[in-house]
Image (tube, rainbow, N blue to C red):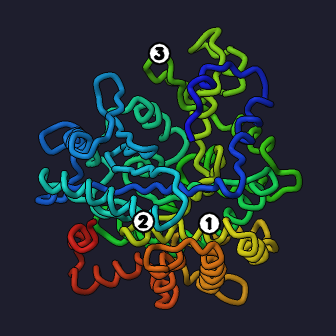
Amino acid sequence: MSIPSAVKSTPIYGRQQLIDYLAAGEKPRDAWLIGTEHEKFGFRTEDLRPPAFEGERGIRALLEGIASRYGWEIAREGDTPVALMRDKANITLEPAGQLELSGAPLETIHQTCLEVNTHLAEVRSVADELGLGFLGMGFQPKWPRDQMPWMPKGRYKIMREYMPKVGSLGLDMMTRTCTVQVNLDFESEGDMVRKFRTSLALQPIATALFADSPFTDGKPNGYLSYRSNVWTDTDADRTGMLDFVFEAGFGYERYVDYMLDVPMYFSYQDGRYVDLSGKDFKRFMSGALDELPGTRATMKDWGDHLTTAFPEVRLKQYLEMRGADGGPWNRLCALPAFWVGLLYDDEALHAAWDLVKDFSREERHALRDGVPKHALKLPFRRGTVRDLAREALQIAAHGLKRRNRLNRNGANESIFLEPLIEIVDANQTPAERKLELFHGVWNGSVDPVFKEFAY
């Protein structure tokens, strides 16, 4: 949800405005929607290299081609096209040109899957003519960080310079990772808290199910979700499992306090990004930043600041599920199905909370820290993460069946869980399947992934 233009310029005079902003996301149950986002790696088909921004076959040409052919409006920084907009959906660029669809808020997973397939078909029709392909995985399998391009977006320049000061893998996060996530609504503060706690505790299970980043620089990296591991050394000030979410009294106010302690990146002023990396948002609220003397933060600044924290679940005016690696089209539909099934049905939400409510802090962290390497095979209590995943999928399937949103063939949304059920039944993640191919018919090369698993 974007901030209404009339509100953007409102100066911030106190914490209550920030709390009220989060609370304004509350929606009655019949207005709950589903917003799905996914990122993908572009590559030149002849040499598999990521395309630069400029040039006849660059990302700019791709954006302009999609816009002119399919009726997208171009958003620019100065004269530079950096995003496309159409019908409440956006196509944006990650730092190294990973192409992201931020889908429109929709009512059903059926609509989400149609949106994804339409988007991929539009991208492919233009990309084919440019000799470009796109791949869904969690981490760039072949190219080193220093061979990744950078997109000309002001906020990325600021982040690029700041990241090495706070972690060793932040630049990898920016340039070599891709995710799929879903954004979901809540009806009250209590509903938000229940969903936040449940989804945060279950996020490692999603990471395990979607694990698809076993290669770095063309070789196995020892992980199944290396993307998930990257976040552990990106920036501790703005990542992680947010233990305070499980503490008594958690709500909007506590999340606001967390965000006020997250160092800033920037403020967008008069068409340019002002570097405020590491600065204190509370000082900005009082107009006390030397870089912007006398300038008070506005609600637009607060909305921007909320996007600069990267925990496993993020609160804005909705909740974002952030634990999954990017993947092929059917898993782009499976991710929202998993979380909608768990969180949008009361009986399912209750059962999902029962599954995780007695996890200790140490167990939640053991899951988060162990899943990137071991995924479904990580031992947990008297079983493994696979057991948790199977139970979570059963709960989600029942939730989707009770929602009873049918397609024209009379099928409910639980059909979109099938790829995840197959993964659990086989006890083999997408990453393990690719490793099997790498050590087998691919003869120690990652190059076939760009053909066999491209969109």
| Circle 2 Cα neighbour tier, 10 Å, few/some/many (<14 / 14–19 / ≥20) | many
The image quadrant that residue 256 belongs to is: top right
Horizontal side of 80 relative to 367 (left or right) equals left
Query: Residue 270 — which label?
Result: 3
Q: CA distance from mark 2 to mark 1?
A: 22 Å
Residue 248: image x %, image y %?
A: 88, 55
The first of marks 3 and 2 along the sequence is 2
Q: Name the residue beneath numbered marker 2.
A: 113
Camera-side residue of 84 and 78: 84
Q: Is residue 262 above or below residue 217?
A: above
Q: Is residue 256 above or below residue 358?
A: above
Q: CA distance from mark 3 to mark 2?
A: 38 Å
The answer to whether residue 393 is visible is yes
Query: Residue 203 — which label?
Result: 1
Q: Are marks 3 and 2 in contact (CB under 8 Å)?
A: no
Query: At 67% across and 27% down in the image, what residue appears?
Result: 280
Query: At 26% across and 54% down in the image, what residue appears?
Result: 123
Q: Nearer the viewer, mark 3 or mark 2?
A: 2
